[in-house]
Image: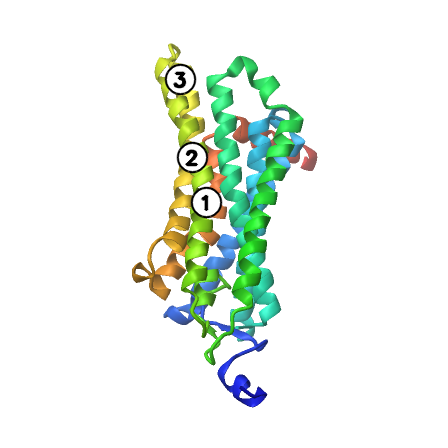
Amino acid sequence: MDNSTWAANYTGQLDFILVGLFSQSKHPALLCVVIFVIFLMALSGNSILIFLIHSNAHLQTPMYFFISQLSLMDVMYISVTVPKMLMDQVMGVNEISAPECGMQMFLYLTLVGSEFFLLAAMAYDHFVAICHPLRYSTLMTHTVCHLLVSGCWFLGSVDGFMLTPVTMTFPFCKTREIHHFFCEVPAVMKLSCSDTSLYETLMYLCCVLMLLIPVTVISSSYSFILLTIHRMNSAEGRKKAFTTCSSHMTVVILFFGAAVYTYMLPSSYHTPEKDMIVSVFYTILTPVLNPLIYSLRNKDVTGALKKMLNMGSVTTL
């Protein structure tokens, strides 16, 4: 095959076109404003939570350290996709180059994978705090917490390094339209001219492994936690333990449920419209929900926030 024929059949390094959310909406300007507001809420909510945890001595515990890392991931997570989408809508451009697409894909996969394992680490922290309270300070030391978080980031980056290069080296057909608002692996793979069935099987197995390990840790931890809560004599202790765990389980169900749909259900269950709705749920809505889930139901965080606001009002006066 000569160069001219190859160029006629493959996109090579030409730009992709993101056929995003706004093309599906009857009111794209209104949708753009709504997403921008949600983006600002996610940034401000998670940033405030990170600031409170690092500035308040009462929040210098392993649980809040993990929550601060979750907020950091959410800030990076939503920043990978939403600013590009909003700028494209404002500028009237919806193209993304192959290197930009690859970088977006890598960051997205890394952050998703890291968050999977971080949620498992948080479940283990809850297990130790509730089931082994007397040994908590020795089991969850400063060093152990940093090692767990470092391991989460490392395992997430492995996911990005494994899937991104393979996905982006496939030849793509003449159509350059990605029916998504960012470069998600399944959406990009649909443009490939070659047989991707083997790679899709390997990707499925990789995703099963990435989900299986955290889910096993989370389910085992909460099984022991529920048994311990059931045996508690103190009603106040049961309420506090249940509140802490229910907040975390809400985040787990939201995040893992969307991931299972995207990467593990057969392609017959997928349509571009459904895929975008699910992606909006866990790339845009989840980052704004997490700080609300962990702050509104947490007396320590709300207390620290009130203290900060009171100090601000006194300083102003």
Callout in the foreground (1, 3): 1
The residue that disc 2 covers is 216
Q: Pick whichever of labels 1 and 2 is earlier in the sequence.
A: 1
Q: Could you say which is closer to the camera, residue 122 or residue 191?
A: 191
Q: Residue furthest left?
A: 268
Callout in the foreground (3, 2): 2
Say which mark, if any, is on residue 228: 3
Q: Looking at the picture, which amino acid does disc 1 mark?
A: Leu
The residue that disc 1 covers is 209
Cα distance in 3D space between marks 1 and 3: 29 Å
Cα distance in 3D space between marks 3 and 2: 18 Å
Give the residue drawn at x 54%, y 51%: 159
303 on left or right of 150: left
Label 3 crowd bin: few (<14), some (14–19), many (20+), radius 10 Å:
some
Name the colouring of the figure. Answer: rainbow
As displayed, is residue 198 above or below residue 293?
A: below
Image quarter in which the C terminus is found: top right
Q: Looking at the picture, which amino acid does disc 2 mark?
A: Thr
